[in-house]
């Protein structure tokens, strides 16, 4: 990758001295954005095909979000949970409307908190604190990702991420993702809930086979376990439906959201459908900032624009353009493409995702090396066909550049493990 500019370097040095090293050193320092473009502190411009990990669904500085947030912050930015405000009610009503279900919403500030709320709901439902431990085990998927706080981390199916921080106090049994028979076998009468992503996001945009969510629904129904669908990454239009599970025609008991919901403002939601919305009672859970007026105003603007501008169908069309365009490229580094809507992974023939990500940045495109052999594309839902085409046109030369880096690594024998 081209060496960082001087302004970036200066910020990287300050970052290293002042922030915990848990993120490593980010290669870029962003200064501003508009639409699908961002500019770094050295004035380099990029087409953003990551959207802050599937968050900035209306791109950057969208006028509707700017207007809604500005108006709200100038009026009332915080109420705490001691007082209600209309925005949280409107947003909850709107989300339930999009689900076509009755139920109740609990707002959080992030995805991991939404899953924490869901875990507590599951415990309460199975009698925790009411003469019963509520301690039925939970089933989750190998390779799944549900967050970094202790409950969500317990559910996360990546041993190297989870194991250094246990024990967690939640009994989680992991099953191979996408295998209905393994799921059915794991969901016995002692199972309290199944937590599942409709597509594994952090594992590299790996969709479940058709029918998997329905099999999970049936397995839960058979034993009285709750089906918790984690749509923190897949929700809010990313796959061309408001929620990815809607493609499968099933209904979860609990749905968790975050990321795209606020279009860049921090907000998440744990939604209990039907009677599951009333499981957590007074005093059972809370958040000082959760569902604050500014984040709710942003989320209402996001939902309004997605609907007004037909961004669900646009996600399908532009996603298909990208998918088909990548599939049509024949290159020794490229094995194929998977995913749906504007949530895709370009799958590589070897562990070359880091050099591909770097070559993309050099060519003016932000993508994400989500796995050693997979590049994630999760662009803003407003991505135009013309913007998608510029990436497709540049991709063969980007792959050539990455292949040269891989060849240099192979010769020097330093880093870059190949599969
Ligand atoms: C499916 C899924 N669940 C939960 C989370 C955690 O969300 P957050 O980082 O907002 O805590 C993520 C984040 O990537 C996610 O993709």
Image: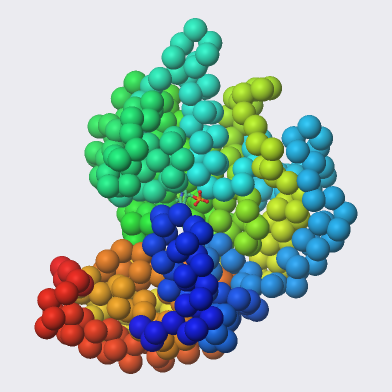
Picture quadrant of residue 101 = top right
Residue 408 visible in the picture = yes
Number of on-image labels: 0
| Residue at the image position 59 percent from the left and 66 percent from the top | 56
Picture quadrant of residue 64 = bottom right
- Taking the image as shown, residue 226 lies to the left or right of residue 295, namely left
Position of residue 210 relative to residue 408, above or below, is: above
- Taking the image as shown, residue 243 lies to the left or right of residue 358, namely right
Picture quadrant of residue 39 = bottom right
| Residue at the image position 82 percent from the left and 56 percent from the top | 72
- Taking the image as shown, residue 47 lies to the left or right of residue 99, namely left
Residue 207 visible in the picture = no
Q: Identify which residue, 199 or 180, lies in the foreground.
A: 199
Position of residue 119 relative to residue 75, above or below, is: above
Give the quadrant of the N terminus: bottom left
Give the percent coordinates (x, y) of residue 66.
75, 68
Give the quadrant of the C terminus: bottom left
- Check the image and tell me how it is coloured: rainbow
Give the percent coordinates (x, y) of residue 162.
33, 42
Q: Identify which residue, 184 or 322, lies in the foreground.
A: 322
| Residue at the image position 84 percent from the left and 50 percent from the top | 76
Q: Residue furthest top?
A: 131
Give the percent coordinates (x, y) of residue 196.
40, 44
Position of residue 306 relative to residue 89, above or below, is: below
| Residue at the image position 56 percent from the left and 74 percent from the top | 30
Give the percent coordinates (x, y) of residue 27.
43, 73
């Amino acid at each position: 990758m081209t060496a960082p500019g001087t302004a970036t370097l200066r910020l990287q040095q300050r970052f290293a001295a002042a922030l915990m090293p848990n993120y490593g050193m980010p290669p870029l320092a962003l200064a501003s954005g508009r639409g699908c473009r961002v500019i770094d502190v050295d004035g380099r411009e990029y087409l953003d095909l990551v959207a802050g990990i599937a968050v900035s669904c209306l791109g950057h500085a969208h006028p509707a979000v700017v207007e809604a947030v500005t108006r709200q912050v100038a009026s009332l930015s915080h109420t705490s949970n001691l007082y209600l405000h209309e925005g949280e009610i409107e947003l909850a009503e709107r989300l339930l409307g999009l689900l076509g279900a009755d139920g109740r919403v609990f707002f959080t500030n992030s995805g991991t908190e939404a899953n924490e709320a869901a875990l507590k709901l599951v415990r309460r439902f199975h009698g925790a604190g009411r003469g019963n431990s509520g301690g039925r085990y939970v089933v989750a998927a190998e390779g799944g990702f549900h967050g970094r706080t202790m409950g969500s981390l317990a559910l996360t199916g990546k041993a190297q991420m989870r194991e250094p921080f246990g024990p967690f106090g939640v009994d989680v049994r992991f099953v191979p993702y996408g295998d209905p028979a393994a799921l059915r076998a794991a969901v016995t009468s002692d199972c309290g809930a199944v937590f599942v992503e409709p597509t594994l996001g952090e594992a590299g945009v790996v969709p479940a086979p058709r029918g998997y969510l329905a099999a999970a629904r049936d397995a839960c129904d058979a034993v009285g376990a709750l089906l918790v669908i984690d749509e923190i990454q897949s929700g809010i239009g990313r796959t061309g439906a408001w929620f990815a599970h809607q493609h499968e025609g099933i209904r979860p008991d609990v749905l968790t959201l975050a990321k795209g919901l606020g279009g860049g403002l921090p907000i998440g939601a744990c939604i209990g459908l039907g009677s599951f919305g009333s499981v957590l009672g007074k005093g059972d859970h809370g958040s000082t900032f959760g569902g604050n007026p500014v984040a709710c105003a942003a989320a209402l603007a996001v939902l309004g624009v997605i609907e007004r501008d037909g961004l669900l169908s646009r996600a399908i069309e532009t996603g298909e353009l990208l998918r088909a365009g990548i599939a049509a490229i024949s290159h020794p580094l490229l094995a194929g493409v998977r995913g749906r809507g504007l949530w895709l992974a370009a799958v590589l023939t070897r562990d070359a995702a880091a050099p591909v990500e770097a070559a993309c940045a050099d060519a003016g495109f932000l993508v994400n090396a989500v796995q050693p052999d997979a590049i994630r594309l999760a662009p803003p839902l407003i991505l135009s066909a013309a913007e998608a085409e510029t990436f497709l046109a540049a991709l063969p030369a980007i792959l050539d550049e990455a292949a040269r880096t891989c060849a240099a690594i192979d010769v020097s024998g330093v880093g870059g493990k190949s599969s």
